[in-house]
Image (tube, coloured by chain):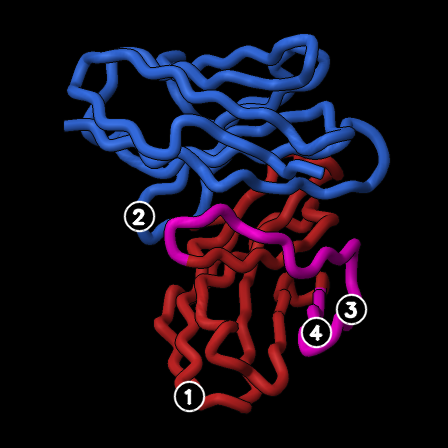
Chain colours: A red, B blue
């Protein structure tokens, strides 16, 4: 069993839709939870960063962490074609990139 | 302020050869991590350097080695290349203290023929 599971998609939605992306994990020692966006042939770009359980909102993006269920989510409101990318969830035991484990990534297509 | 830079952008090698990839961290960062990202997969942690020493290592063979210089830049070396080493190699920098997360460079795409 992988430490982090993420549905690879692809997920295709119309412009303006609410997008829900999810990951599950098996190791309860993870304390830091991140979402990265990666455009084709580029490096990952940090979108959201959450410590422990709870919600965090930044503009159109909301990250949720449920440590009791070992489940994290990223919601994108009013999705735009420019949101089309691969979204990677990531988790670590400590800060500064200490042993970060990534999911496989979900490919998202937002149709105009 | 320059972000994380990596060189070269692309590289083609043949099996059995050796390769060196380079990374300069974001200004103010002193920790460099290297990742391998195969096509359609998430990045896999190779190792992390801090204060010129390897601090953490993932499940990669000894063919993968690295180095960090006093200016915090880093090199990733891969010996005896295999076809399966073809991937995007990502460098990420972060601060050794505090709660900063890591910032990624654009990657080096390595093709092994």
Sequence-wise first label, 3 or 1:
3
User: What secondary structure is marked by label 2?
Assistant: loop
Q: Which residues are magenta?
A: A40-66
Height in image: A12 above or below B58?
below
Height in image: B86 above or below A106?
above
* Residue A33 quadrant: bottom right
From the image, state whether disc 2 or disc 1 is nearer to you: 1
Check contact, mark 2 vs mark 1: CB within 8 A: no
**C-alpha gap between disc 1 and disc 4:** 22 Å
Check contact, mark 3 vs mark 4: CB within 8 A: yes
Is-magenta flag for residue A62? Answer: yes
* Residue A104 quadrant: bottom left
Question: Are the numbered discs 4 and 2 placed on the same chain, yes or no?
Answer: no
Q: Which mark is residue A112?
A: 1
The residue singled out by tag 3 in the image is A56
Majority secondary structure in the magenta region? strand
* Residue A76 quadrant: bottom right
Report x, y in % for residue B6: 49, 30
Question: Are the numbered discs 3 and 4 placed on the same chain, yes or no?
Answer: yes
The residue singled out by tag 2 in the image is B39
Residue closest to the far front:
B1
User: What secondary structure is marked by label 1?
Assistant: loop
**C-alpha gap between disc 4 and disc 2:** 28 Å
For image coordinates 46% across by 43% down, the residue present is B43
Dot 4 surroundings within 10 Å: few (below 14), some, or many (20 or more)? Answer: some
Report x, y in % for residue B106: 48, 41
User: What secondary structure is marked by label 3?
Assistant: strand
**C-alpha gap between disc 3 and disc 1:** 28 Å
Question: Are the numbered discs 2 and 1 placed on the same chain, yes or no?
Answer: no
Name the subunit of mark 3: A
The residue singled out by tag 4 in the image is A62
């Amino acid at each position: 069993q992988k430490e982090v599971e993420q549905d690879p998609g692809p997920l295709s939605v119309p412009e303006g839709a609410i997008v829900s992306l999810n990951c599950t994990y098996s190791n309860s020692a993870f304390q830091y939870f991140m979402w990265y966006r990666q455009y084709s042939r580029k490096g990952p770009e940090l979108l959201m960063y959450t410590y422990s359980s709870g919600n965090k909102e930044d503009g159109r993006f909301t990250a949720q962490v449920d440590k009791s269920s070992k489940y994290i989510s990223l919601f994108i409101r009013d999705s735009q074609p420019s949101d089309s990318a691969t979204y990677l969830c990531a988790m670590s035991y400590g800060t500064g990139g200490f042993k970060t484990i990534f999911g496989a990534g979900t490919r998202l297509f937002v149709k105009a | 302020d320059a972000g994380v830079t990596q060189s070269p952008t692309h590289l083609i090698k043949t099996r059995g050869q050796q390769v060196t990839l380079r990374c300069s961290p974001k200004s103010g960062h002193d920790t460099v991590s290297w990742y391998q990202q195969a096509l359609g997969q998430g990045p896999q942690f190779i190792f992390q350097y801090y204060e010129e020493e390897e601090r953490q290592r993932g499940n990669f063979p000894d063919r993968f080695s690295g180095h960090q210089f006093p200016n915090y830049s880093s090199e990733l070396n891969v010996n005896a290349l295999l076809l399966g080493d073809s991937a995007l190699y990502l460098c990420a920098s972060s601060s050794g203290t505090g709660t900063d997360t890591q910032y990624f460079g654009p990657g080096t795409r390595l093709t092994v023929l």
